[in-house]
Image (cartoon, coloured by chain):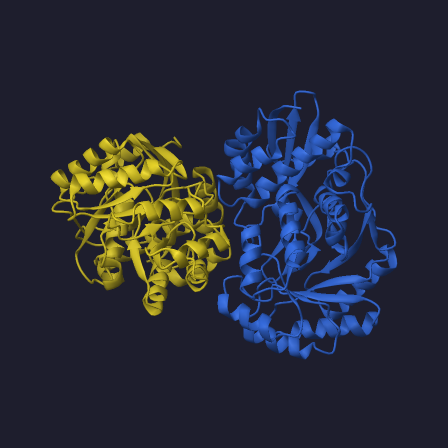
Chain colours: A blue, B yellow
């Protein structure tokens, strides 16, 4: 069970259609595959999707920090010593996505070593997650068509709508078109990715007040300290925090300062070990959570589903788990499927999925 | 005045004696020299000291983010368009030291282009800073001897004492030895680099309550949200924030939440452009600041002095500007000197200093 090596392999897979949102655009998944090897010959795997505009990490920084700092922190420990590795990695500030991938690869290796599913090791509350689909910027007609396709093909009836454009009426028109096109039975919520000022956000929320939104996520910059508090105090819609809550301490600060009412949990940035800290914190504080998507590929989506299904709190709401459908290829040997609006947690030891080594050889960019 | 290229050159210079403190140890300055070139043939220079344990940046990540993201953001702009470059770099989260170096190199190039000192462009309040010397972990006798040498050789009479060890009595013994050895005329303050729990910090402060400390800096982890508030509320000594306040928004959060009473400003992490935002914020809020040291070499120290001397608020207290004395070599053609406890801002256009190209060729690690 002793870790003998940690690999960080950069790779690139194009999206069929670029994902566009207020804080950026992603046309190619330039991720880093992290693999943990043990002296039993077990290999645990996880994905690190660098997001310069969200966490400041780049593909180059993830590869470097895993190779130079986190691999030495993990090698020689047992895959059970997750808290040891977490404490060692914690000495390096930031780098959440790199740390999360090392952590989740250790969990995968642990599950494979024990012959047990990671989702069950984490809590085993249920075996599937309902799925929410994220709609990036397009015209109202295109976004309605995409939502209809997701509903008709995959049974998805919950949609996260990207907003935060200027003028904000662009986005209000989209949300109205979605509500009118899809009816009252679908669930809609919006994500501003910090695109609006508090004033714009308040105007847009007022203009959407008849559209039955569930909540609004990260409408204003995380650093608009007082503006976000004002918005959260005056909006009748719960405000969920995402990019502003990358650590448990940030969760605490946003919630206690009144800047947020709910929390997005992303395994891509918290891993499983710190992610469970956030679950404990939010459950203890009596705060709702949503399993968010870091524009993940299939491996990242498996991690989201495994974690989301593991606890009662994280499985209450549909998880954002469908972005992989927009990728032109993937690294998994067997593709995930979403049916009847649900994604089943893959069965089998660890994360329950296997890599396609030929695909990795094809997409990796370091050889 | 148009920027044609931005270089990021990694280099390494050993310290004669490693600097040891609660959050880490620095034995070698593995920094990145950033150079901005303009179409007039002007070259502006600044230093980026990566601190994985403080900001999460590594030498590799700084080189990569400057090369891949910040150089493209700056090339084509005028050296006057600092706000444009700042806004573009702001789209990438974090990476404070890399951003700061690009900003300060632009200021150096601007000063050289205009034939004016950067310190005067920034405000020109005075032409020198008083110097505070930082004492890293050693035995009480060694730390007293180092302080005496600094006083006798350089006229320094203000000392920042690194604390945060376990048991905390180790540090109390040092501070008591310094007070007894140096007398009541020297100024002493302590920096915990997040080494203590709030409980330990409260006990240590109580044990040092007769030693006439000026203030205490970052005794507890930045993420001990409620613990820091409790300590700040109950201590009779002002609590200064450093690692926890790397952005203006973090300054706001720490001050408004009651976790801190004063702010350390470091040009190495804020540059001049964002550093002036912090000055404006703190002056407006009525909060004291100190010019801190990122274990800078001479070029970084010049930036601290230029900025510290530029404003009334930043020149009130002695600046932490003597760490370069512990380095075994440097990149500047002419060495800085500290006399009568003061460091004069180098005269001449820009930052007023020139690189020793032979030294750079010797210490750079990319060739």
- Front position in the image: A13 or A128: A128
Q: Which quadrant of the rendered structure holds the C terminus of chain A?
A: top right
With B346 as the anchor, is A65 left or right in this view?
right
**How far across and down, in percent of the image, does residue B338 sit?**
16, 44
Give the image location of residue A96, x and y in percent. 56, 45
Q: Position of residue A241 (x, y in %)?
A: 61, 60
Vertical order, B210 against A84 (above or below): below
Residue positioned 62% across, 34% down in the render: A82
Quarter of the picture holding the N terminus of chain A: top right
Q: Residue at x 74, y 78 (%)?
A: A210
Q: Is residue A192 left or right of residue A325?
A: left
Q: Can I make out residue B35 in this image?
A: no
Res. A180 visible in picture: yes
Q: Is residue A105 above or below residue B216?
A: above
Residue A198 vertical placement versus B251 (above, below): below
- How many marks are shown on the rendered structure? 0
Instruction: Determine which quarter of the picture holds residue B126.
Output: bottom left
Q: Nearer the viewer, residue B109 or A352?
A: A352
> How far from the left and from the top, in percent, is residue A111?
73, 32
User: Foreground: B129 or A122?
Assistant: A122
Can you tell which quarter of the image residue B127 is in?
A: bottom left
**Image side of residue B238 versus residue B332, left or right:** right
Give the residue displayed 18% in from the left and 50% down from the top.
B346
């Amino acid at each position: 069970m002793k870790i003998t090596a940690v690999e960080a392999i950069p790779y690139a897979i194009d999206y069929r259609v670029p994902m566009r949102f207020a804080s950026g655009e992603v046309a190619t998944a330039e991720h880093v595959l992290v693999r943990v090897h043990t002296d039993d010959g077990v290999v645990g795997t996880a994905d690190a999707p660098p997001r310069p505009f969200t966490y400041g990490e780049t593909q180059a920084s993830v590869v470097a920090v895993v190779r130079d700092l986190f691999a030495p922190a993990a090698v020689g420990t047992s895959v059970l010593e997750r808290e040891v590795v977490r404490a060692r990695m914690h000495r390096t500030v930031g780098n959440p996505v790199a740390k999360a991938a090392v952590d989740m690869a250790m969990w995968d290796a642990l599950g494979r070593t024990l012959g047990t599913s990671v989702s069950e090791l984490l809590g085993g509350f249920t075996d599937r997650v309902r799925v929410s689909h994220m709609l990036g910027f397009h015209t109202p007609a295109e976004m309605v068509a995409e939502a209809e396709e997701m509903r008709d093909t995959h049974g998805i009836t919950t949609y996260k709508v990207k907003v935060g454009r200027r003028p904000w009426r662009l986005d209000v028109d989209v949300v109205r078109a979605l509500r009118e096109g899809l009816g009252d039975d679908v669930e809609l919520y919006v994500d501003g990715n910090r695109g609006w000022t508090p004033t714009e956000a308040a105007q847009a929320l007022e203009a959407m007040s008849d559209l039955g939104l569930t909540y609004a996520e990260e409408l204003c910059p995380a650093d608009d300290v007082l503006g976000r508090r004002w918005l959260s105090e005056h909006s009748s819609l719960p405000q969920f925090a995402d990019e502003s809550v990358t650590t448990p301490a940030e969760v605490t600060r946003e919630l206690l300062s009144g800047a947020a009412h709910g929390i997005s949990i992303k395994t891509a940035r918290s891993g499983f070990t710190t992610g469970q800290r956030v679950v404990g914190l939010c459950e203890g504080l009596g705060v709702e959570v949503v399993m968010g998507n870091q524009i993940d590929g299939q491996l990242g989506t498996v991690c989201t589903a495994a974690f989301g299904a593991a606890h009662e709190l994280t499985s209450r709401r549909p998880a954002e788990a469908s972005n992989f459908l927009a990728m032109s290829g993937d690294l998994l040997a067997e593709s995930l499927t979403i049916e009847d609006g649900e994604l089943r947690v893959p069965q089998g030891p660890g994360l329950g999925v296997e890599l396609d080594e030929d695909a990795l050889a094809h997409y990796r960019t370091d050889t």
